[in-house]
Structures are given as C-alpha cells and as structure tokens.
C-alpha cells in the first residue's frame, strides 16, 4: 500500500513484477526474504516480552 501511495519501489512491487514475468528464482528469493523478516520480527518481539515481563522465560 505504501509503495502505491508514495510511488516507492519495494519488495512488494518487485514480487508482483516477478510473478507476472514468471521469474521463479526472483519470486523464491522475495518470498524467502519476506519470511525471514517475519520470523526475525517475531523473535525480537518474543525477546522483548521476556525483558518486559519477568514471568516469561526464554528457556525452561
């Protein structure tokens, strides 16, 4: 949505263009990049929960 409103090129537009051009290696790279960012963000949030709430442990 931000890419469309502000006309900033980004991974979303790159992914759509790659799908339309049937550039499968680029599609795989974009999906992997988005998935790794999602996993990394979730890991950071889990660590922040452990710091913010002492009842939450990272290891059992």
Image: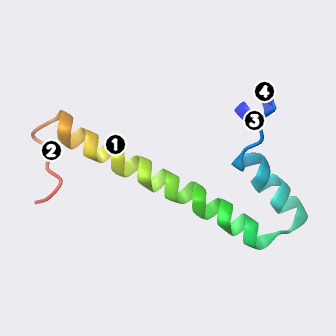
* Residue 39 visible from this viewpoint: yes
Give the residue at mark 2. Answer: 56
Question: Which callout, 4 or 2, points at the residue further toward the start of the chain?
Answer: 4
Mark carried by residue 35: none
Q: Callout 2: 10 Å neighbours few (<14), some, many (20+)? A: few
Give the residue at mark 1. Answer: 45
The Cα atoms of the two marked residues, 4 and 2, are separated by: 40 Å
Q: Residue at coordinates 70% horizontally, 49% vertically from top-left?
A: 11
The Cα atoms of the two marked residues, 1 and 2, are separated by: 12 Å
**x then y, percent, for residue 7:** 81, 32
- Relative placement, left or right, of 2 versus 43 is right
Q: Image quadrant for the C terminus?
A: bottom left
Give the residue at mark 4. Answer: 5
Q: Secondary structure at mark 4?
A: helix
Q: Residue at coordinates 72% horizontally, 44% vertically from top-left?
A: 10
Give the residue at mark 3. Answer: 3
């Amino acid at each position: 949505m931000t890419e469309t409103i502000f006309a900033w090129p980004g991974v979303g537009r790159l992914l759509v263009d790659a799908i339309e051009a049937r550039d499968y290696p680029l599609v795989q790279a974009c999906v992997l990049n988005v998935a790794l960012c999602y996993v990394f963000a979730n890991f950071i949030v889990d660590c922040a929960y452990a710091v913010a709430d002492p009842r939450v442990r990272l290891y059992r």
